[in-house]
Image (tube, rainbow, N blue to C red):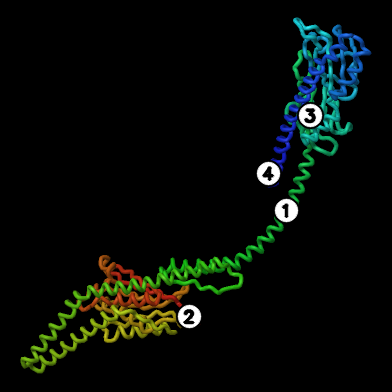
């Protein structure tokens, strides 16, 4: 910023010098035109013509004084038709410049004269009587000074120092006489140059002052110098730099205070919202809520955003529940085919057993028939129970529960009467009690573990492992078996109601388990490869009892 400000200041000075130089040129041209027009008007006055025609100096001299005063000229000279001087007013040269003396009688001449003090421009016009050809009575010559007064006047107009010079000398200036000598070397330059005057640095440009109207033999034109001080501008920049440094310090202090306030009022609620969104992205749980502790200075917009986010998650949870209910009701519409297959077969077996009892069976046959009837009745009861559990809305009763205890009870229930080795437990004992419906969760785990047990029944070295872990604000339950795995075509349908690959299965175990897990705001996922085994992962929000309260 400092370097740029210096460059901009330098460029602004240069632009100012160029503009001021143009104004000086315009002022000089206007001044020349003004005196030329005035000289023509005065030279055409009958009173002046009559006096000059007498060629009598005492008659002409009062008019010279009068018209010089009216024109506010520096000098005025009236000459006769032979060049004799009839009247002189002001400090006029002893002899008129050669450009005037050698001009034709009817020619208008503009040239310069260097008096003892300063510089003057002289305009000379003929005094004529109209006719063909005109009668030449004499010549009117007027001059105006390019002096200190004019330099001071143009300084006020341009805001720049002005100097007039010729023949390598400075003849007039708005600067004091003691400071003019260093400016002489600028008279021969055509570009913007630097000069040091006393304790100040200046930039200046030279502008030739051309006579108007242009006259042959007028001699070299004087020079007008236009200068602007760099020191004043640099002094302003130093003041600006000091102000910028002070402003920077104050800005840093204010920024620190504002940043602290922003962190207190905006960042904390937004951090909670961001954390909730990350958990949603990591777990896929679209029902997560933002937990905010309202503070006095919390940003209202951030709090509104958090409230809106919570409202959105509540709506998603409600929609998911309704969608699940609609899915279950839709599944009930397909239940007729399952009932026709799953219930008709047990009824046929029961009917056959009853016919054998009616026809007088032996004791062994009666015992076998009764066993068949009991087995098929249990099967019918299990089918009805599964269908009702899947169809009806699940009502959860949340209470503090030990997740590891629920897992142990589920393993014992799933392995009651099993022929394979008991499930292997790998439980994280550091998991604290959490709010959940222990009985519903146990039902889901029993269904999953039962499927795992059936998967390893036929494997000689079958193994089932049940593990728990806690990380990132959630508890994870994993059921892993080394059974034959699930075919890719079947894997996409394992959560479809009534889909099963076992002859005695109803296809409702995993759908019921998923309904329970999602009702507890958790997620369930399955990873399986043929001949390598299956892993079912359950992620539950690890809500502590005091947090839920």
x and y percentages locating residue 156 in the rendered image: 80, 35
Q: Looking at the picture, does residue 240 appear above or below residue 455?
A: above
Res. 245 mark: 1
Q: Which type of secondary structure does the marked residue at label 4 adopt?
A: helix
- Image quarter of residue 250: bottom right
Q: Which residue is mark 3?
A: 225
| Crowd rating for badge 2 (residues with CA inside 10 Å; few <14, some 14–19, many 20+) | few
Count of labels in the image: 4
> How far is the residue under mark 2 from the one under mark 1?
54 Å
Q: Which residue is mark 2?
A: 548
> How far is the residue under mark 3 from the one under mark 4?
28 Å
Dot 3 or dot 4: first in sequence order is: 4
- Identified at 50% across, 79% down, the residue is 547
| Crowd rating for badge 3 (residues with CA inside 10 Å; few <14, some 14–19, many 20+) | many
| Crowd rating for badge 4 (residues with CA inside 10 Å; few <14, some 14–19, many 20+) | few
Q: Which residue is mark 4?
A: 4
């Amino acid at each position: 910023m400092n370097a740029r400000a210096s460059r901009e200041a330098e460029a602004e000075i240069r632009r100012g010098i160029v503009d001021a130089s143009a104004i000086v040129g315009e002022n000089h041209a206007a001044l020349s035109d003004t005196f030329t027009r005035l000289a023509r008007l005065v030279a055409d006055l009958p009173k002046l013509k009559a006096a000059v025609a007498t060629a009598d100096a005492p008659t002409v001299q009062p008019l010279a004084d009068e018209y010089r005063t009216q024109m506010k000229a520096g000098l005025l000279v009236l000459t006769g038709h032979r060049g004799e001087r009839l009247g002189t007013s002001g400090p006029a040269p002893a002899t008129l410049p050669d450009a005037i003396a050698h001009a034709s009688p009817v020619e208008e001449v503009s040239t310069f004269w260097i008096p003892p003090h300063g510089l003057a421009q002289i305009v000379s016009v003929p005094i004529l009587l109209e006719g063909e050809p005109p009668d030449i009575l004499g010549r009117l010559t007027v001059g105006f000074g390019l002096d200190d007064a004019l330099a001071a006047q143009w300084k006020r107009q341009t805001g720049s120092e002005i100097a007039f010079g010729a023949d390598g000398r400075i003849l007039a200036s708005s600067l004091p006489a003691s400071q003019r000598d260093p400016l002489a070397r600028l008279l021969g330059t055509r570009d913007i140059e630097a000069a040091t005057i006393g304790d100040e640095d200046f930039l200046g440009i030279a502008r030739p002052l051309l006579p108007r109207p242009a006259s042959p033999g007028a001699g070299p034109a004087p020079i007008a110098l236009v200068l602007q001080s760099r020191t004043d501008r640099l002094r302003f920049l130093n003041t600006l730099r000091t102000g910028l440094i002070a402003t920077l310090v104050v800005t840093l202090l204010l920024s620190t205070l504002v940043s602290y306030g922003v962190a207190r009022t905006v960042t904390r609620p937004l951090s909670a919202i961001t954390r909730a969104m990350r958990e949603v992205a990591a777990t896929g749980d679209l029902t997560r809520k933002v937990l905010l502790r309202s503070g006095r200075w919390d940003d209202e917009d951030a709090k509104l955003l958090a409230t809106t986010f919570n409202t959105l998650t509540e709506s998603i949870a409600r929609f998911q529940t309704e969608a699940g209910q609609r899915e279950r009701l839709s599944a009930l519409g397909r239940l007729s085919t399952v009932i026709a297959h799953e219930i008709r077969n047990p009824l046929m077996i029961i009917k056959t057993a009853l016919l054998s009892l009616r026809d007088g069976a032996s004791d062994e046959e009666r015992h076998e028939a009764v066993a068949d009837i009991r087995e098929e009745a249990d099967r019918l009861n299990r089918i009805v129970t599964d269908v009702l559990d899947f169809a009806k809305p699940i009502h959860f009763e949340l209470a503090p529960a030990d997740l590891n205890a629920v897992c142990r009870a589920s393993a014992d229930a799933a392995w009651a009467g099993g022929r394979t080795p008991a499930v292997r437990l790998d439980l994280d004992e550091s998991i604290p009690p959490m709010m959940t419906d222990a009985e519903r969760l146990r039902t889901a785990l029993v269904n999953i573990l039962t499927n795992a047990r059936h998967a390893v029944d036929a494997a000689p070295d079958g193994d089932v492992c049940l593990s728990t872990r806690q990380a990132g604000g959630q508890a994870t339950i994993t059921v892993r078996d080394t059974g034959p795995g699930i075919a890719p075509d079947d894997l996409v349908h394992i959560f479809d109601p009534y889909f099963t690959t076992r002859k005695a299965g109803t296809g409702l175990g995993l759908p019921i388990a998923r309904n329970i897990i999602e009702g507890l705001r958790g997620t369930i996922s399955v990873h399986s490869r043929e001949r390598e085994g299956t892993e079912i992962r359950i992620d539950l929000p690890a809500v502590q009892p005091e947090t839920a309260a």
